[in-house]
Image: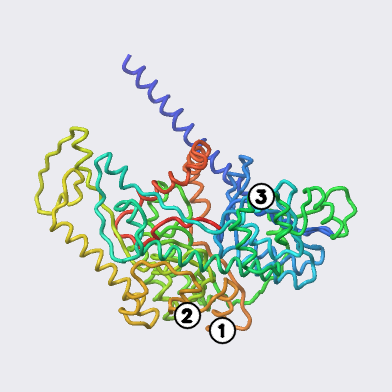
């Protein structure tokens, strides 16, 4: 009988082992199949084609296509800014592309990304080709982008959501009090408002001041851009917003000359078809899925300017599975900088930073490699929507910093949060007993109030980190620590404001940063290579696809509340001293 069970278990184990091996082989085959689905051959448009750019979803600097979503038939709602700009440039020079048709949708992205696309479309118009915009519903950001079109149309029952900027902060102090949790706050920076939701019931006057300041700067630039594109006084644009005409009769948008005419989508497409010289019944268009594969001239020079993307929150790489977001900045970015420093073909680096900050420790490691690369070749920072707090930390050592006028930057300050759950333990009648070898072995014990000497230790650590932050900025910007401290204190500035106070050197986008890097490296003939600081796709597929599926399910269940869930997960993944923006920045 014993022998029988041995044979049975051995057979069962063999079947399980074989099944496991087959599963691994099948998964490898699946990876190859999915990858083949995502790849595409070079696209050659037919004569009289129209480039249709649908403004839907979000825009990331260098979003990578997820082949798994193709296999599952999901739409990709994350567009790549890099691909969009390249497609617009290709459309300008391709003789078969007659114009661009902008279709407004629920676009959610930062103003700096929109500014970059607007400049590209303005440049495209120099070719003499047309740009026509239409939407059933114009979000504020989509309209700001579409305002550079030759003609703007809207559905007769549509909406132009031009209402101005607002920012809302949720405060947790009352809730925490109810459950018996006190958040112990350690910070340096008068304007470092990230801790306010845990210690106040409303915004401090300093925080309110900085929010109002950067909002007015951004809104001023947006209204000025619309005014110039549409030849409408800024006062009229503000009157449209102040009168609440976004929910009035759509004819108001025409009256204020924000929209040229109210037309149905089918009518606009028929008109676009005529402008393109098409005779078929259906409008012939090419979307981003095709245009990013359009043939472009390639520079064969061995000398390169490398663009390295650092996008997302700064945190240890092992925390990504908890956070459920592949867009993070980890020490991988520092490793990529080391490779670029040692690559003799790379003559200059453009470091594209789009981050609200995060771990001060990781930021220090990346800063060090920026400093090292600067010793052997030029490095220019190109700031995206946000390069603040830790995002500024990793930028400050560069030779030149280029920011968009509406980039949110600065926020030079640090903080730490530790919960005291004594009240919660009391409510639940929980007790603890501790045995320890040394005085501070239980410094992170949540079940008891923190002693004053422990608080002093942590506050001293925060102040040392802030002093180091000031030192890094002082060295990088050739300013005294006192000067940096005066404009630091956690305060957020727009790129336009940052230029005036010396935190950035130039205003512009990626194109400005690349041309500046070329001048610093004395390059006339060079090619541009793009490098992602995120994890390799195949490693992502192995390690994170189950997480993405799980997060997709959470999104489906939570709907609009998903952002709050994401914030909570982000808080859980933040460890150590943080150099981070005080809040999530809403899209335009």
Q: Earlier in the sequence, mark 2 or mark 3?
A: 3
Residue found at x 22% / y 43%: 421
Q: Label 3 crowding class (10 Å Cα cut-off): few <14, some 14-19, many 20+? A: few
Residue 90 vs residue 500: left or right?
right
Mark 2 → mark 3, Cα distance in angstroms: 56 Å
- The circle on residue 139 is none
Vertical placement of 496 versus 238: above or below?
below
Vertical placement of 363 versus 177: above or below?
below
- The circle on residue 377 is 2
Res 578 visible: yes
Residue 256 at x, y percent in the picture: 70, 61
Q: Which residue is mark 1?
A: 519
Q: Which residue is farthest top?
A: 1
Q: Label 2 crowding class (10 Å Cα cut-off): few <14, some 14-19, many 20+? A: some
Q: Secondary structure at mark 2?
A: loop
Nearest the eye: 588 or 259? 259
- The circle on residue 248 is 3
Q: Nearer the viewer, mark 1 or mark 3?
A: 3
The figure's colour scheme reads: rainbow
Residue 27 at x, y percent in the picture: 54, 40
Mark 2 → mark 1, Cα distance in angstroms: 12 Å
Residue found at x 53% / y 56%: 587
Residue 516 at x, y percent in the picture: 55, 80
Q: Earlier in the sequence, mark 2 or mark 1?
A: 2
């Amino acid at each position: 009988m014993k022998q029988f069970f041995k044979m049975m278990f051995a057979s069962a184990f063999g079947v399980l082992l074989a099944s496991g091996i087959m599963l691994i082989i099948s998964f490898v085959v699946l990876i190859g199949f999915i990858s083949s689905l995502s790849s595409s051959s070079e696209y050659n448009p037919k004569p009289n084609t129209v480039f249709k750019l649908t403004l839907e979803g979000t825009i990331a600097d260098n979003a990578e296509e997820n082949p798994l979503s193709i296999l599952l038939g999901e739409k990709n709602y994350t567009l790549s800014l890099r691909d969009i700009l390249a497609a617009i440039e290709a459309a300008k020079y391709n003789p078969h592309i007659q114009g661009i048709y902008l279709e407004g949708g629920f676009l959610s992205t930062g103003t700096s990304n929109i500014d970059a696309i607007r400049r590209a479309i303005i440049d495209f118009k120099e070719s003499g080709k047309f740009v026509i915009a239409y939407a059933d519903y114009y979000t504020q950001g989509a309209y700001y982008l579409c305002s550079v079109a030759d003609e703007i149309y809207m559905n007769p029952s549509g909406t132009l959501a031009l209402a101005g900027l607002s920012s809302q902060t949720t405060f947790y102090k009352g809730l925490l009090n109810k459950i018996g949790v006190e958040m112990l706050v350690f910070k340096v920076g008068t304007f470092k408002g990230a801790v306010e939701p845990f210690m106040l019931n409303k915004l401090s006057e300093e925080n309110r001041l900085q929010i109002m300041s950067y909002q007015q700067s951004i809104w001023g630039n947006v209204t000025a851009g619309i005014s110039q594109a549409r030849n409408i006084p800024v006062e009229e644009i503000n009157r449209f917003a102040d009168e609440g005409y976004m929910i009035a009769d759509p004819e108001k948008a025409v009256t204020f000359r924000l929209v040229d005419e109210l037309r149905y989508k089918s009518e606009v497409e028929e008109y676009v078809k005529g402008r393109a010289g098409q005779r078929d019944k259906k409008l012939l268009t090419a979307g981003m899925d095709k245009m990013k594969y359009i043939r472009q001239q390639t520079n064969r020079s061995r000398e390169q300017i490398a663009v390295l993307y650092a996008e997302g929150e700064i945190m240890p790489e092992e925390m990504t599975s908890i956070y459920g977001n592949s867009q993070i900045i980890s020490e991988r970015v520092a490793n990529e900088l080391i490779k670029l420093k040692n690559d003799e073909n790379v003559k200059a680096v453009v470091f594209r930073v789009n981050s609200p900050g995060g771990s001060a420790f990781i930021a220090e490691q990346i800063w060090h490699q920026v400093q090292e690369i600067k010793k052997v070749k030029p490095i220019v920072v190109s700031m995206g929507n946000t390069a603040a707090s830790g995002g500024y930390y990793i930028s400050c050592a560069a030779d030149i910093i280029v920011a968009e006028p509406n980039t949110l930057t600065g926020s030079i300050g640090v903080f730490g949060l530790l919960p005291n759950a004594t009240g919660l333990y009391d409510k639940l009648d929980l007790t603890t007993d501790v045995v320890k070898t040394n005085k501070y072995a239980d410094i992170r014990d949540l079940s008891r109030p923190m002693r004053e000497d422990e608080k002093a230790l942590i506050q001293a650590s925060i102040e040392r980190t802030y002093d180091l932050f000031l030192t890094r900025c002082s060295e990088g910007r050739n300013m005294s620590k006192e000067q940096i401290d005066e404009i630091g204190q956690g305060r957020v500035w727009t790129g336009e404001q940052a230029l005036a106070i010396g935190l950035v050197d130039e205003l512009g986008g990626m194109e400005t940063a690349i041309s500046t890097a070329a001048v610093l490296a004395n390059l006339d003939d060079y090619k541009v290579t793009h490098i992602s600081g995120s994890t390799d796709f195949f490693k992502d597929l192995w390690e994170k696809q189950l997480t993405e599926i799980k997060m997709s399910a959470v999104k489906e269940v939570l709907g609009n509340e998903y952002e709050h869930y994401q914030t909570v997960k982000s808080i859980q993944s933040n460890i150590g001293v943080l150099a981070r923006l005080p809040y999530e920045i809403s899209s335009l």
